[in-house]
Amino acid sequence: MIIEFLLTILIVGFVTAGLNIKFDRFFTILLLLFIFKLTIFESINIFLWVILLGALMILLDNKNEISSLPKNMKLKLFIMIPIFTLIASFFGTWIFSLISSSILIIILGILAILYGLRLVFIHFKHHELDLQKEHPIIAKICELFGPILSGFSIGLVGTSLKPLKIPFAIKIGKMNAKKVYLRNTITTFFASGFAILWHFVFTKGMTITIFYEQMILGAALWTGIHYMFEITNIMFKDKWRKAFQTLIGVILVLASIKVFMLI
């Protein structure tokens, strides 16, 4: 178990440092399957703790910025998003509890391909990270359906679809990257928290002991990944990141083959 743990935090920490990803570390699910040899159900349950703690850390780091937001914005972020994610994560978890492991693995493999292709072909230009004139219709669609989609996806397979949602919001909706990331972080925090609750209720064979074991492993993985991220992030220069992102995208697409072989 120690070897598996160290390999996982080393790989995920290093990869996410190169990609500058601080939460929704999708690679963790794959390593829980391949290195820890856990089931898809166990891997998703543990991964929920990883993304919950990752999102919480970012929210704590931005607490001053959040507290300075207008009241109407806070209502959207902390009233509407929790309601949407509570309901959506319930339905995602309900389906999670009904479908077979083979279907979940197929979904995971498809996401690995989509996430990999996103890393290969979609790279943000510097000016795209500070857009100010968003497309009003696309922005409304993202505000309404973003939390619903993420909540459902997190309940079902543990990931918020961030690698697909963010490019859509920025490239198509011309939305401000910082606002999009903050909103997605809040969405992920609530969705993963509610999903953990629903998974405890719906997962077959779940006991208090198993729940605590998964919580401890998830928290330990997040802690290790977080510090490995901080350490290895120092060595990455911005000029390397585009090539590194492309390389990881190719690897992720190839890894999908191994995912499908688990069926």
Image: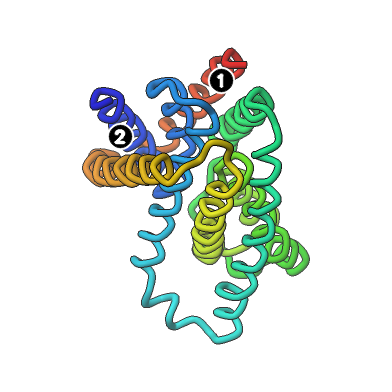
- From the viewer's perspective, tell me whether residue 206 is left or right of residue 133: left
Residue for point 57% across, 41% down: 203
Quadrant holding the N terminus: top left
> Which element carries disc 2, helix, strand or loop?
helix
Q: Earlier in the sequence, mark 2 or mark 1?
A: 2
Instruction: Categorize mark 2 by other alpha carbons within 10 Å: few (<14), some (14-19), many (20+).
Output: many
Vertically, is 125 above or below 173?
Answer: above
What amino acid is at disc 1? Val
Amino acid at dot 2: Ile
Q: Which of 5 and 164 is in front in this view?
A: 5
Residue count near mark 1 (Cα–Cα under 10 Å), binned few <14, some 14–19, many ≥20: some
Residue closest to the eye, 105 or 247: 105
The residue carrying mark 1 is 259
Q: Give the percent coordinates (x, y) of residue 195.
A: 56, 52
Q: Give the percent coordinates (x, y) of residue 246.
A: 49, 30
Figure check: 94 above or below 5 = below
Q: Residue 231 carries which label?
A: none
Q: What element carries label 1?
A: helix
- Front residue of this view, candidates 116 and 33: 33
The picture quadrant where one finds residue 86 is bottom right
The one of 206 and 237 positioned closer to us in this rendering: 206
How far apart marks 2 and 1 lie (CA) works out to 20 Å
Farthest residue toward the bottom? 71
Q: Is residue 253 left or right of residue 239?
A: right
Residue at label 2? 9
Residue at horizontal 43%, vertical 57%? Answer: 55
One can see residue 231 in this view:
yes
Find residue 99 and report its horizontal and vertical position in percent.
70, 32
Residue 237 visible: no
Instruction: State the quadrant of the C terminus.
Output: top right
Give me the residue at 44% from left, 40% from top.
Answer: 46
